[in-house]
Image (cartoon, rainbow, N blue to C red):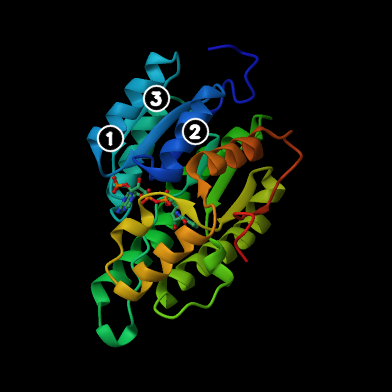
Amino acid sequence: MSQNLPLAGRIAVVTGASSGIGEATARKLAEQGAAVALLARRKDRLQALAEGIRAAGGRALALAVDARDRTAVADAARSIAAELGTVDLVVNNAGVMLPSGVEEHRVADFEQMIDLNVTGVMRVVDAFVDPLVAAAGKGGPSDLINISSIAAHGVFATFAVYCATKAAVTHLSRNLRAELGPKRVRVSVVEPGFVDTELQGHMTDEKAKAWIASAKQQITWLTADDLANTIAFTAGLPRHVNLSHVTVMPTEQV
Ligand code: NDP
């Protein structure tokens, strides 16, 4: 791998790397020279991605981790430190979107969204904040990039819990920036509009599915690569520049 690449020498972690935005981002960060740790539950997909990155000359480590499991996340952080080194770039991306009306009482879905999208994001912060601060202290760039959504600001019937989880991620990021920015860790929150990934495929609510299908016909959605490019650009900026709040929209989405 060339030392001239923008992210050469960086050690990255991407959660939710088995599909969509996380997979595309992991591939892009590796292309730009970073060593990448790939976290998600589907190990076969992570291994295939890691093999592809290695075949292209990069460094990758695949770790099957459920971000709802605090011990598994902490164990992964220890394995990454031992095998790749001090993490200086975290893309905190794993998330689920399971809309349903409150009167349907799908409490398990509410719990899954809150446990992954909010508590899971904080488990990952907890596991990697020490290396991020250490890396910043050594004089290099250090990034915590949290993936929220424009849903953080939206009001959509049946999406109340998802929107609330993303509002939490956005506000969490602003507050973490106040704490970590003075230590030279850049905290960024990325809020995409519609991105063509597996995310919507997990929905079961018929009205929500119809709304999404119609939106897909009407406008050109973002691709996972569009987000990967934005995230890699954010991480590749000079150390004193923090793109702290990034909204990425399909041009036609209002
Ligand atoms: P995908 O469904 O393609 O990716 C979600 C990723 O999260 C997968 O890799 C999945 O892997 C992982 N994941 C799910 N549950 C867990 C878990 N319990 N532990 C660890 N990893 C888990 O969707 P996207 O790429 O679209 O989503 C990525 C992020 O982008 C999410 O936070 C989403 O909210 C956000 N976003 C997406 C938008 C869109 O329109 N697609 C718009 C705005 C924001 P696995 O199943 O293998 O564990």
In this image, 77 relative to 45: left or right? Answer: right
Question: Is the residue 66 above or below the residue 151 in the image?
Answer: above
Image spot of residue 150 (x, y percent): 56, 64
Is 171 situated above or below 226? below
Q: Nearer the viewer, mark 1 or mark 3?
A: 1
What type is the residue that disc 3 sits on? Ala
Rounded to the nearest angstrom, the CA distance separating label 2 from label 1 is 18 Å
Q: Is residue 233 left or right of residue 34?
A: right
Tell me which residue sits at (49%, 33%) in the image.
12
The secondary element bearing badge 1 is classed as helix
For marks 1 and 3, the one nearer the N-term is 1
Which residue is drawn at the image coordinates 37% and 59% (left, top)?
Answer: 200
Query: Label for residue 12?
Result: 2
Q: Earlier in the sequence, mark 2 or mark 3?
A: 2
Q: Residues within 10 Å of mark 1 (few under 14, many from 20)?
A: some
Point 40% across, 63% down: residue = 213
- Element marked by disc 2: strand
Q: Is residue 4 above or below residue 218?
A: above
- What's under tag 1, amino acid-wise? Arg
Residue 207 position by quadrant: bottom left
Q: Nearer the viewer, mark 2 or mark 1?
A: 1
